[in-house]
Amino acid sequence: MAQLQQPEIESEQELPDIPFNLPAVEGRELEHVQAAVRGGHLSSGGEFAHRTAEILAADTGSPEVLMTTSCTAALELSAMLMDLKEGDTVIVPSFTFTSTGLAFARQGAGLVFCDIEPVTLGLDPAHLASLLDDHVRAVVVVHYAGVACDMEGIRAVLADRPDVRLVEDNAHGLFGRWRDEPLGSLGRFATLSFHETKNFVCGEGGALVLNDPEDVDRARVLYDKGTNRHAFMLGQVDKYTWKDTGSSFGMSDVLAAYLLGQLEQREAVQAKRRHLHERYESALAPHTEELGFEVMRVPEDRRPAHHMYYVLLSHRDRRNDVLELMRKTGVQATFHYQPLHTSEAGRSFAARTTECPVSQDVSDRLLRMPFYNNLSDPDADRVVAAFLDAATATLPDR
């Protein structure tokens, strides 16, 4: 009598990898791109750039939003608007991407690296207060993971320094809130990112949010390669000429068309990401003490933008071991920023040496889970299982 064959059970190793990030078409992106191409206006300043800027201005209450080729470009434009001079310094967090500092170093400013506080991983107001002097012209804050930093503390520190401009590097925080205020509305300037790793994407892209009407006219000139082209397009002058410094910052209307399709689905996209955040939170939080890790924290007065989900392991070696074990199961978790104050370029551009121990500690211990719009519940559960197994396997007594 022939034996019955047992069905083959697909092992975890045979499952497809879960990537760290996977951009998705969410709505009418391709339809809008076709319309832009057929309309014949492919460069910057077109209908779709105007429509995306309107959505962003409505969210932040800004008098003007300029669509740029990247968040880096938007930061560079904000730096140009400051007319930084030799001896001027800009305070930036050490725990951030290089663009946050690079944009101001390119304009000749010395950088002063500030530490982060351990709750939101945003700029530490206490350290900021110790760094302020007469050379500081701007302070840049980053709303890490889309969670607003301690704006109350930062505002208190800067209350008697109206000459210091506040810049929000809001690459992670679009549609997030601090109390009742939108992220992107809190600084004189704010910058946004639409890189493929962000909540809303067009491959590469960004925006500069101008929150002071006094900056609008000059920003338009710098944005248009130093010309008064915008005034010409409005019929305010009969020709446009070279007026100031500037560069080619404008986002192609083809990319703006794709981005519009994403932004039109902002409520649906943010709901998906909130669901994933909550699923990770509910599955991981009960195991923190037993397995020796921390979950990310969101203060009650913040509404996060749900850009990512991270955990903190007990030390660097364990974090790296957990990452390796997760990747062996096909789950592509990753680490994040290396502190800028310890980098070769950071030391070169620094106006003076500062110590940022929390930045170093967080950088060593932070692990980011796969996080994207359409990560399914079963795959999210697989991520959680891979992490918990790896965390168990790397406990000190194992």
Image: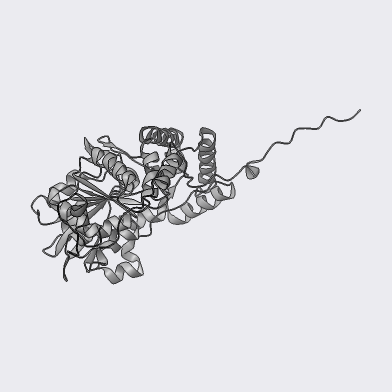
Residue 185 image position (x, y, % from top left): 21, 43
Q: Can residue 173 be seen?
A: no
Q: Can residue 120 be seen?
A: yes
Q: In the picture shown, does residue 383 fall above or below 320?
A: above
Number of numbered markers: 0
Residue 323 image position (x, y, % from top left): 51, 51
Q: Is residue 367 left or right of residue 43?
A: right
**Colour scheme shown:** one colour
Q: Residue at x 39, y 32 (%)?
A: 268
Q: In the picture shown, does residue 373 fall above or below 236?
A: above
Q: Is residue 301 left or right of residue 155?
A: right
> Foreground: 292 or 253?
253
Q: Residue at x 8, y 52 (%)?
A: 160
Q: In the picture shown, does residue 14 fall above or below 276?
A: below
Quarter of image, res 58: top left
Residue 379 image position (x, y, % from top left): 54, 37
Q: Determine the residue located farthest toward the front in the rendered image.
A: 238
Q: Determine the residue located farthest toward the left in the rendered image.
A: 160
Q: Residue at x 60, y 44 (%)?
A: 16
> Foreground: 306 or 373?
373
Residue 258 image position (x, y, % from top left): 41, 44
Q: Is residue 384 left or right of residue 253?
A: right
Quarter of image, res 306: top left
> Foreground: 74 or 241?
241
Q: Residue at x 38, y 44 (%)?
A: 257
